[in-house]
Amino acid sequence: MDHEEHEVYGGEIPDEGEMDTDVAEDDDRTEANAKELEEMKKRLKEIEEEAGALREMHAKVEKEMGAVQEPSSASASQAEKEEVDSRSIYVGNVDYACTPEEVQQHFQSCGTVNRVTILTDKFGQPKGFAYVEFLEIDAVQNALLLNESELHGRQLKVSAKRTNVPGMKQFRGRRPNPYLGFRSRRPFMAAPFFPSYGYGRVPRFRRPMRYRPY
C-alpha cells in the first residue's frame, strides 16, 4: 500500500507527545502562578495585621499621654488664673456710662494698669461693675485705698478679686421678702383639737324619751 503524502498549510502538524508536553508545562505554570498569588495574599494579610496592631499601639500611647497632660495643663491654667487674680481688683457701683479708659485713668496712680474689663449682659448693657488687672501685685494694695472714691458722681466699691475654684459654688443665703414677711422653715403643725365638753369628761348619751300622752 503506497504512502500518501498530505500537504500541510501553515506549518507542520505537531506530534501528540509534543502537545502533551506543552499542556503539562501550562499546568505547571498555572500552579506556580496560583502558589505565588496565595503567597502574595498571605503576605498582604500579614502586613495589614501588623499595620492594625501599630495603629492600636499608637492610639493607646496617645491616650495615655493625653491623660497625663490633661491634669498638668489644668493645674497650670488654674495657677496662671490665680496669679492673674492676685494682681486684679473688683470695682463695684460703676456708672453705666463709664468707659474702660476712664476707669484706667482713675486707677493709674496705683500702678500700671494692664487691662480693664467692664462686665455686660447678653444685650450688651453694662452690669455696673468691672475688673482691673495690674502688672504689679503691690498695685492692688494701693488700689484698695481708693475704696469709696467717686467716679462720675458715684462711690466705687473696691476690693481684691477672688479666684473662683472649679466645682465649688458659693452659697448665698436667701433674702427675706419684706412684702411677704418672715417665713420660718418649721413644718406646718395643725392646732390641737379640744372637745366642747371639756378635758377628761366623757359625754353621756341619753336614751330618747318615749311619748306618753297620759
Image (tube, rainbow, N blue to C red):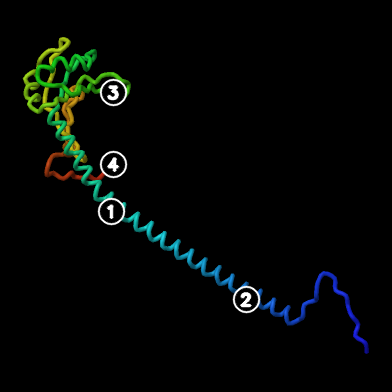
Q: Quadrant of residue 185?
A: top left
- Left or right: residue 28 versus residue 1 is left
* Chain-order first, disc 4 or disc 2: 2
2 or 3: mark nearer the eye:
2
- Residue 196 seen: no
Q: Earlier in the sequence, mark 4 or mark 1?
A: 1
| Above-or-below relation of 70 to 110 | below
Cα distance in 3D space between marks 4 and 3: 91 Å
Local crowd size for mark 4, using a 10 Å CA cut-off: few (<14), some (14–19), many (≥20): few
How far apart are the two marked residues, 3 and 1, measured between alpha carbons? 41 Å
Q: Give the residue pinned by disc 1.
A: 64
Camera-near label (4 vs 1) is 1
**Label located before the other in sequence (2 or 1):** 2
**Residue of label 3:** 121
Q: Distance of mark 4 from mark 2, alpha carbons? A: 140 Å
State the residue at coordinates (32%, 56%).
Answer: 60
The label nearer to you, 2 versus 1, is 2
Q: Position of residue 37 (x, y in %)?
A: 56, 68
According to the image, label 2 marks what residue?
Answer: 28
N-term mark: 2 or 3: 2
User: The disc labelled 4 sits on which kind of residue?
Assistant: Arg
Q: Residue at x 62, y 73 (%)?
A: 29
Read off the residue under disc 4. 212
In the shown orientation, is residue 129 left or right of residue 40? left
* Mark 2 secondary-structure assignment: helix
Query: Helix or strand or loop: what does disc 3 sit on?
Result: loop
- CA gap, disc 2 to disc 3? 85 Å
SS category of the residue bearing label 1:
helix
Q: Quadrant of the N terminus?
A: bottom right
